[in-house]
Amino acid sequence: QTLQKLPKLLGLRKGKRAGETFSCALRPMLWNHKNLWKGGGTQIMKNCKKLLLLVLALCLALAAVGCAPAEEAAPEVNVPVQDIADELLAMEDQFASMMDFGEEVVSEMCGLDYSLLEEASLNDAMMNVHARVLYIAKVKDIADVDTVKEAFQKRLDLLQQTFETYLPDQYELAKAGQIVSNGKYVMLVVSTDSQAVVDRFNEILDEAAAAA
């Protein structure tokens, strides 16, 4: 109640921010301290009361800020990348025969920097008549998510170029491919229904975050 009455007791105008309020009230008293002693005993007491109330309000405001609870950090999600890949690859009618062609081949295709990754499962179709890709990577530093996305985009662009004048039905699948991220995890998917795979990818990670 005392804090609510302070602006009225101090004769301050509405609409000012806290810092401006204290500054406006203190400036005439502190810049010219003789103002404190003008007007006789009654006025001196009023000026001193205003100053004390200002100091009290400032102390209470600082104490309230200091006691505010700190925001909790987002829980660390630690789902093995291969576990996610295995579950997604097992989805019915989504992928053809797939295999991981290894770091050297993938790096040549899209320039992916493996040193940025904590884990990765990078699967392409074994036969070149299928436009199917499932790349999942977990970065060491979340700041590198966009860098990995750029590399995955190069792989998707290459796949689309390959099938554009080759197999129209596979080209349509390649055009519907998606690159998404969830925390430190990044995925490139081209499948029969890429959105369904994306939805399941997010469900796995969101469930893990909720349980953390």
Image: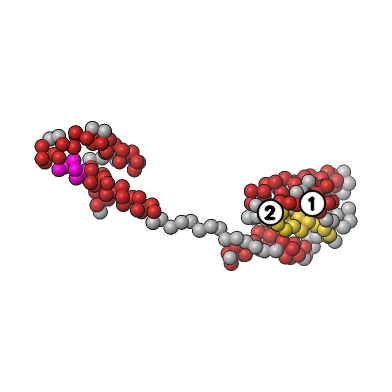
Residue at 78% across / 60% down in the picture?
94
Residue 206 painted magenta = no
Foreground: 33 or 163?
33
Among the two numbered marks 1 and 2 on one chain, the one whose residue lies closer to the N terminus: 2
Vertical relation: 40 (above or below) 67 = above
Type of amino acid at the residue the image marks with label 2: Val
For label 1, count other residues whose C-alpha is less than 10 Å away and answer few (under 14), some (14-19) or many (20+): many
Residue 20 vs residue 118: left or right? left
- Does the rendering let one see residue 132? no
Residue at 56% across / 58% down in the picture?
74
Residue at 60% across / 62% down in the picture?
209
Query: Which residue is under mark 2?
Result: 139
Q: Main secondary structure of the magenta part?
A: helix
Magenta segment boundaries in residue numbering: 45-50
- Element marked by disc 1: helix
Tell me where residue 38 sits by quadrant: top left
**Distance from the alpha carbon under mark 1 to that under mark 2:** 27 Å
Residue 82, x across and y down, in percent: 74, 63
Query: Which residue is under mark 1?
Result: 173
Foreground: 205 or 94?
205
